[in-house]
Image (cartoon, grey):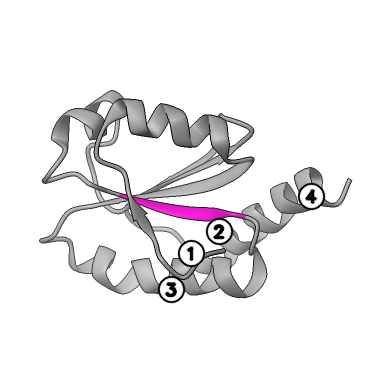
Amino acid sequence: MSSDTQIIKTRSQLDLILKEHKALLIFLSSPDCNICKELKPRVKRLLEDEFPKIQMFIIDAELNPELSGQLKVFSFPTILLFFEGKEYVRLGRYFGMNNFRDDLQRLYSLFFNP
């Protein structure tokens, strides 16, 4: 995974990204979300260290409320995990990193180590 995390700004950009990447994680947040500020680097580090084939993208809900609404995300942070363009995991607000890691491992193994 690249160390640069890309920001999604439009629906058309999101649709293109979903087609181009076999596995991706979208982290939706807002600037005033303190949990988001703590969680985002932890999620990024987890992907880099253990799940390098999953690309991370960011959607800032304050800058793009329409896109957040289209994704039916109204609380932050929210994590959406996609494989082959399909949403497999949706986690919102409060969740444990261990359970999140277990979900990632199960799906990662399914898609990358059949």
**3D distance between C-alphas at marks 2 and 4:** 18 Å
Of the 4 image quadrants, the one containing the C terminus is: top right
Judge left or right: residue 97 versus residue 31: right
Q: Mark 3 or mark 1: which comes first in sequence?
A: 3
Camera-nearest label, 3 or 1: 3
Circle 1 — which element? loop
On the image, the x and y values in percent for residue 24 come to 53, 46
On the image, the x and y values in percent for residue 39 come to 35, 68
- Residue at image position (46%, 70%) is 3
Residue 56 seen in render: yes
**3D distance between C-alphas at marks 4 and 3:** 22 Å
Tell me, yes or no, whether the two marked residues, 2 and 3, touch with CB atoms within 8 Å. no
**Region of the chain picked out in magenta, as a range:** 54-58
| Amino acid under disc 4 | Phe
Instruction: Tell me: residue 101, above or below residue 19.
Output: below
Disc ID at residue 46: none
| Amino acid under disc 1 | Gly
Residue in front for this viewpoint, 94 or 7 = 7
Circle 4 — which element? helix
Q: Main secondary structure of the magenta part?
A: strand
Task: Give the residue at mark 4.
Answer: 112
**3D distance between C-alphas at marks 1 and 4:** 24 Å
Q: Mark 2 or mark 4: which comes first in sequence?
A: 2
Circle 2 — which element? helix
**3D distance between C-alphas at marks 2 and 3:** 11 Å
Task: Give the residue at mark 3.
Answer: 42
Whether residue 87 appears in magenta in the rendering, the answer is no
Disc ID at residue 100: 2
**3D distance between C-alphas at marks 3 and 1:** 12 Å
Disc ID at residue 96: 1
